Amino acid sequence: MRSATNKKYLARNFGFVFVSNSVILDHRPVVAMFRQEPNPNVSFSGWCFICSENGEPTDIDLYSVDRLLEADPSVEAFLDAPVGSKFIRLPDGTFVPDSDDE
């Protein structure tokens, strides 16, 4: 299990993230992630992480960033990306910026 070594990612410092339950419960990899404008009235970082394009809205819940990183540590390098960022995972496992051109 991953420990919270970086205090900036604790929920009280960073905010919570929306994550597909399949990522947390089944350890399925994140396939897409995007960052919306955070809500200053709640502890929400603006990040959403999904594991499938066919995911149901009921499959997504708020989790701590540490819980997400325990399930899929590959997303940690992107957590400092600015609002409006979108990334998709390629078949080789790397993430690339997602464009709306497709």
Image: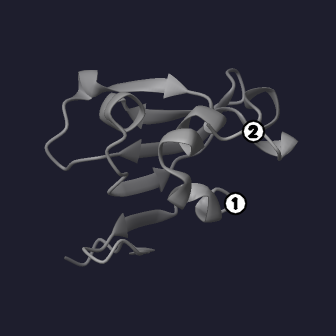
In the image as oriented, which residue stretches furthest toward the front?
1
Res. 14 mark: 2
Q: Give the mark nearer the N terminus: 1 vs 2.
A: 2
State the SS at label 1. Answer: loop
Q: Foreground: 72 or 47?
A: 72
x 83%, y 47%: residue: 6
Please tell me which residue is depicted at 64% across the width and 56% down the height of the picture: 79
Instruction: Indicate the amino acid at tag 1.
Output: Asp
| Amino acid residing under circle 2 | Phe
Reply above or below: 45 against 11: below
In the image, residue 36 sits, relative to residue 100, either above or below, namely above
Q: Which residue is most to the left? A: 54
Side of 54 where 57 appears, left or right? right
Q: Toward which corner of the image does residue 81 lie, by quadrant? A: bottom right
- Asked whether the viewer can see residue 82, the reply is no
Image quadrant assignment for residue 58:
top left
